[in-house]
Image: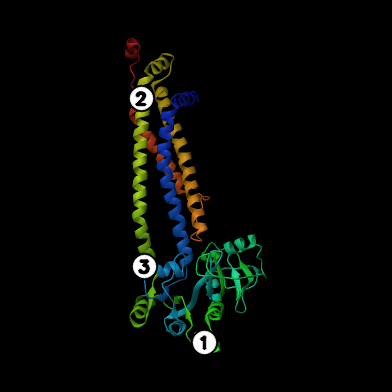
């Protein structure tokens, strides 16, 4: 205990140097913790949202865009596909389930998605209040949407108007309001951020807004479209032939989520590696700074060390003071780094929440973070090795003679 107190006094004696060591270590650890927290949550979110989805079929364009827009609802779809073509695909012997997805409108920045009840069953979501829709122009709100609507005084049974487009500032379809008939329990999936309704509701809103007369309305009904279709295979063997069939034999494209997510993570991995390299450089600088600080402390306080030895302190006790100095600085930097990492993650999460994007929070703890802190302690001990060995070999008589 006396060694710890003495080490703390020596740290306090040079506050600026101690603060620099702590800050360098904290920045490096904060970067690593931020990457770990974000990667874990993004990957977990993607895995949850992709469960049960074998392929997504939509308009020609970027397959990655199709996945981001149709599965995660964080991008703009490239176009629509004819309803008749989707219905023809549903008859394919390799298709088990085809779930239509129609987007184009929003409410308070949350997307209104026209679909079927199979989309809710896909994520095993449960009704929290009210009931599922039973007719066009009835809507069910995901958990996050329900919370936002409640803050605006919109509960089950109330009506609301959707806005044209996927932003919050589009033209309001006031002539075709929706009725909120139910809300969903929190599922920690993409449904939390969506307003769900029958596909017929989406058609009805836009046909009423654009049709000039009855014949025009009938023409629109015959040319009905959906944005994309989520498909489940009857057999895993369909993954080999079905996407090729769609891409070569139709005017649509099929995107396999597993392939596109691999591409996405590979692209994101480049940026993550750069940040990891930056964090490693910061930690290396922190280790060198700690080594220099301990070495200077050893040289500047040689008389103190010699006096401790004369008073009966063993070489191990003197070396232990330096070890405790290193541990105090490392633990301070580690705690600060963890706090900064969680704070930065929470900040990024709040920015993504404002864009109705992937949910990320700083209020989680991963077991891997303990290994990061343990690695920082090991780094500090390695940095303190040379000063500690020098302290252990101090020549007391020579130092006192020089004094």
Residue drawn where x is 43% and y is 16% of the image: 312
Q: Nearer the viewer, residue 37 or 178?
A: 178
- Residue 237 seen in the figure: no
Q: Nearer the viewer, mark 1 or mark 3?
A: 1
Q: What mark, if any, has residue 259 been given in the picture?
A: 3
Residue 384 as seen in the image, left or right of residue 157? left
Instruction: Check disc 1 and report its element: helix, strand or loop.
Output: helix
Q: Secondary structure at mark 3?
A: helix
Q: Which-is-in-front pick, marks 2 and 1?
A: 1
Label 3 – label 2 distance at C-alpha: 55 Å
Q: Quadrant of the C terminus?
A: top left
Q: Where in the figure is residue 362, as x and y percent of width and height?
A: 51, 50
Vertically, is 202 above or below 333?
below
Which mark, residue 216? 1
Residue at the bottom extreme of this rendering: 215
- The residue indicated by pointer 2 is 296
Q: CA distance from mark 1 to mark 3?
A: 42 Å
Specify the quadrant of the image occupied by residue 245: bottom left
In this view of the protein, which residue sits in the foreground, 79 or 270?
79
Taking the spot 41% from the left edge, 70% from the top edge, the residue there is 66
Q: Residue furthest front?
A: 212
Is there CB contact under 8 Å for labels 1 and 3? Answer: no
């Amino acid at each position: 205990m006396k060694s710890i107190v003495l080490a703390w006094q020596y740290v306090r004696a040079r506050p600026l140097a101690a603060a620099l060591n702590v800050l360098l270590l904290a920045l490096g650890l904060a970067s690593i913790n931020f990457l770990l927290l974000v990667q874990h949550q993004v990957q977990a979110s993607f895995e949850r949202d992709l469960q049960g989805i074998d392929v997504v079929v939509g308009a020609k364009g970027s397959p990655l865009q199709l996945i981001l827009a149709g599965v995660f609802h964080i991008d703009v779809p490239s176009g629509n596909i004819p309803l008749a073509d989707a219905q023809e695909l549903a008859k394919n012997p390799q298709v088990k389930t085809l779930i239509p997805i129609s987007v184009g409108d929003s409410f308070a920045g949350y997307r209104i998605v026209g679909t079927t009840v199979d989309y809710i069953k896909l994520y095993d979501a449960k009704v929290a209040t009210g009931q599922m829709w039973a007719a066009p122009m009835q809507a069910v709100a995901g958990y996050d949407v329900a919370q936002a609507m409640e803050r605006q005084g919109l509960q089950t049974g109330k009506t609301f108007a959707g806005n044209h487009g996927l932003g919050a500032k589009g033209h309001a379809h006031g002539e075709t309001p929706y009725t909120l008939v139910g809300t969903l329990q929190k599922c920690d999936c993409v449904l939390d951020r969506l307003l769900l309704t029958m596909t017929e509701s989406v058609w009805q809103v836009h046909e009423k807004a654009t049709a000039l007369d009855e014949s025009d309305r009938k023409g629109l009904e015959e040319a009905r479209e959906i944005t994309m279709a989520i498909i489940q295979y009857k057999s895993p063997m369909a993954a080999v032939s079905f996407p090729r069939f769609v891409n070569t034999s139709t005017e649509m494209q099929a995107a396999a989520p597993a392939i596109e997510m691999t591409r996405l993570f590979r692209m994101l991995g480049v940026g993550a590696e750069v940040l990891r390299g930056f964090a490693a450089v910061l930690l290396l600088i922190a280790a060198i700074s700690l080594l220099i600080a301990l070495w200077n402390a050893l040289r500047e306080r040689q008389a103190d060390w010699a006096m401790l030895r004369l008073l009966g302190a063993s070489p191990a006790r003197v070396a232990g003071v330096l070890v405790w100095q290193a541990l105090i600085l490392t633990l301070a930097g580690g705690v600060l780094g963890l706090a900064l990492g969680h704070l930065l993650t929470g900040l990024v999460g709040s920015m993504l929440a404002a864009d109705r994007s992937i949910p990320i929070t700083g209020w989680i703890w991963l077991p891997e973070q303990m290994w990061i802190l343990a690695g920082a302690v090991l780094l500090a001990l390695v940095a303190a090795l040379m000063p500690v060995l020098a302290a252990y070999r101090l020549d007391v008589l020579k130092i006192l003679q020089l004094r």
